Amino acid sequence: MRTILIIFALLLGLVAANETTVVLREGQYVNRVWDSRWTEGSIYSGPRGGSYSPDGALPIDASTAIESRGLDMPNVFNNAERGGIYEVTSDIPAIFRTSIGGTEPELFIQPQYRQFLNLIDESISTIPPGK
């Protein structure tokens, strides 16, 4: 039954193929973009989601992030006009894959490990819309 569900999810594009488990090391930096309309409890993507970019640099503009990170999918509420850099504070596992619906690599971090990501306040930025 589980195999059937995974195949069905792959067909729907809900699960990325070629996922690899990696370890993020203490002191490493990752980044994340979120919706500028986000407030605590809202439907919009916020700073504590599951998907992160595996480097310490924010995208040049929101349209680039939306396209490359697969954020233009149905039921994804993320205009990518805010972003920040996170420092990994302890070695943690993550799933490395190509972003679902996008073209760039991403890291999916399970909820229990997100406490080991320190959002650097000075890095929180407004990202221009782009195209």
Image (cartoon, rainbow, N blue to C red):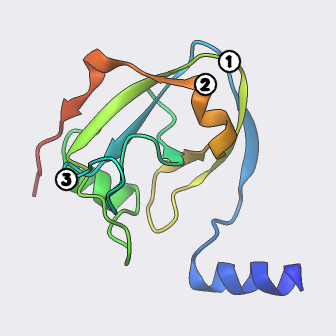
First along the sequence among labels 1 and 3: 3
Residue tagged 2: 116
Residue tagged 1: 90
Above-or-below relation of 70 to 87: below
The quadrant of the picture occupied by the C terminus is bottom left
Residue 91: image location, x then y, percent: 72, 21
Assess whether mark 3 and mark 1 are in contact (beta carbons under 8 angstroms).
Answer: no
> 10 Å neighbourhood of mark 1: few (<14), some, or many (≥20)?
some
- Image quadrant where residue 2 sits: bottom right
Residue 101: image location, x then y, percent: 46, 68
Residue at the image point whose x is 66% and y is 46% from the top = 110
Is label 1 or label 3 in front? 3
Q: Which mark is residue 23?
A: none
Q: CA distance from mark 3 to mark 2?
A: 25 Å
Q: Amino acid at mark 3?
A: Arg
First along the sequence among labels 1 and 2: 1
Residue tagged 3: 37
Assess whether mark 2 and mark 1 are in contact (beta carbons under 8 angstroms).
Answer: yes
First along the sequence among labels 3 and 2: 3
Residue at the image point whose x is 66% and y is 35% from the top = 113
The quadrant of the picture occupied by the N terminus is bottom right
| The one of 91 and 21 positioned closer to us in this rendering | 91
Q: Amino acid at mark 1?
A: Ser
Residue at the image point whose x is 57% and y is 77% from the top = 13
Q: CA distance from mark 1 to mark 2?
A: 6 Å
Name the side, left or right, on which 100 lies relative to 85. Answer: right
Q: Amino acid at mark 2?
A: Phe
Residue 31: image location, x then y, percent: 42, 33
